[in-house]
Amino acid sequence: MWISDFRVVTADRVIDRGAVRVEAGRIVEIADTPVVGAKISGDGLLLLPGFVDMHGDMIEREIEPRPNVPMPLELGLRDLDRRLAVAGITTAYAAVSFSPASTYGHLRSYEHTSAVIRALRAMAGDLLVDHRVHARFEITFPKALAVIDALIAEGAVDLISLTDHTPGQGQYRDIERHVEKMVREKGYSRDEAAQSVARRIEERTLPAEIMTRTLQAISATCHAHGVALASHDDDSPAKVALMRDLGAAISEFPVTLEAAAAARAMGLATAMGAPNALRGQSYSGNLSARDAHAHGLLDILASDYHPSAILPAILELARTDPSGLAGATLLATLNPARALGLGDRGEIAVGKSADFVIADDTGIGHVRATVRNGAMIYSDGSIGRQQAA
């Protein structure tokens, strides 16, 4: 079955009016010219690979849309699934946390997060998108290690990131800025905010030997089970080096240009948020994804907290990418697929999975339809609701 007359975005070029033949959910042929009698005609729309999203924080807001107002897990997960499909995401890593003492503690308890992971796994066959699990391991909560070990042994976790949200380092390295944020967003007085930050630092500061044992243990578990490992909020070359030595292959959300450069030099792929790239700035005042891209230090775009930002971010970065649209598209497709060991997807190439985003690039861009394994999982009606395989 042919889909034809699209601007086909491959890994290294854009075919102006190309066509792609799909059989049994795979790409079997690519043509540089339109094909007569195609099942789907694009009339010059973009055909991009399906987006591979390594970090999406939306799951908690779907299962508890207002504080302390939980919805059935099945409902929240179905809603998330549809939201991702509409954004062009065909492979999604749900970023879940094990940090019971955090602001979202009741949602991030060991029991609740484990239940979410298992529910997502149980529903996998009924969902539109290929859902995988990105477990964020807060290294200041070593008790979570046994819980995560058990989930990894079950085959329920696909990616681990090592996080530390203690004020004074990483994303919150600027303590004064963090205090001001709490005053502004939570209504604390300045003294209350400062005392809260001091308590968090005290509570989360662990002896060096405990921290070392914890990091070595989670690294060994990931290596033994073939689970990808990422660092998080790297703020210095020294931290990047530590994460590399533990086996991390991805540095997600480096907070300084220096850390991003160190990650690249040490062989780690750098990942940043699509909302950051689209807006041109980090909401927390850290490294701009556009600046990282301008310095050639951005490898992966993730949805972070807003999946519909991926397509507009690609179009924005395409303006300055040395390889134009083809180069910017790699950030949300082939680059994350390779970093995560997914060799069967991420590009429009013969033999790869027929995962596509059909979109226009007027204004900020618009996802018209999403195809996974040759089947149309979303359409806005302008393309048609028929199966693509």
Image (cartoon, grey):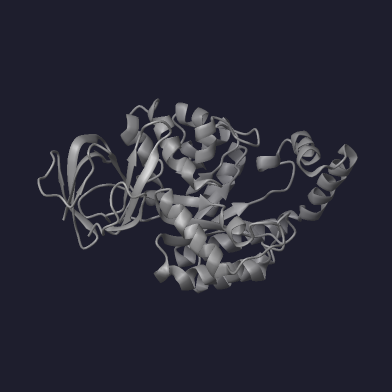
Please state, as top left, top right, bottom left or bottom right, where the N terminus lies in the image.
Answer: bottom left
Q: Residue at (41%, 50%) from the top-left corner?
A: 52
Q: Residue at (56%, 53%) from the top-left corner?
A: 58
Q: Residue at (45%, 57%) from the top-left corner?
A: 82
Q: Horizontal and vertical percent for residue 307?
A: 49, 47
Q: Horizontal and vertical percent for residue 283?
A: 63, 36
Q: Residue at (60%, 37%) from the top-left corner?
A: 255
Please tell me which residue lies in front, 318 or 248.
318
Please tell me which residue lies in front, 334 or 265.
334
Please state, as top left, top right, bottom left or bottom right, where the C terminus lies in the image.
Answer: bottom left
Q: Is residue 221 visible?
A: yes
Give left or right: position of 106 versus 343.
right
Q: Horizontal and vertical percent for residue 290?
A: 50, 30
Q: How many marks?
A: 0
Q: Horizontal and vertical percent for residue 362?
A: 37, 32
Give left or right: position of 21 versus 268.
left
Task: In the displayed orientation, state which residue is furthest to the left.
Answer: 36
Please tell me which residue lies in front, 263 or 208.
263
**In the depicted structure, whether residue 253 falls above or below residue 294:** below
Please tell me which residue lies in front, 138 or 369.
369
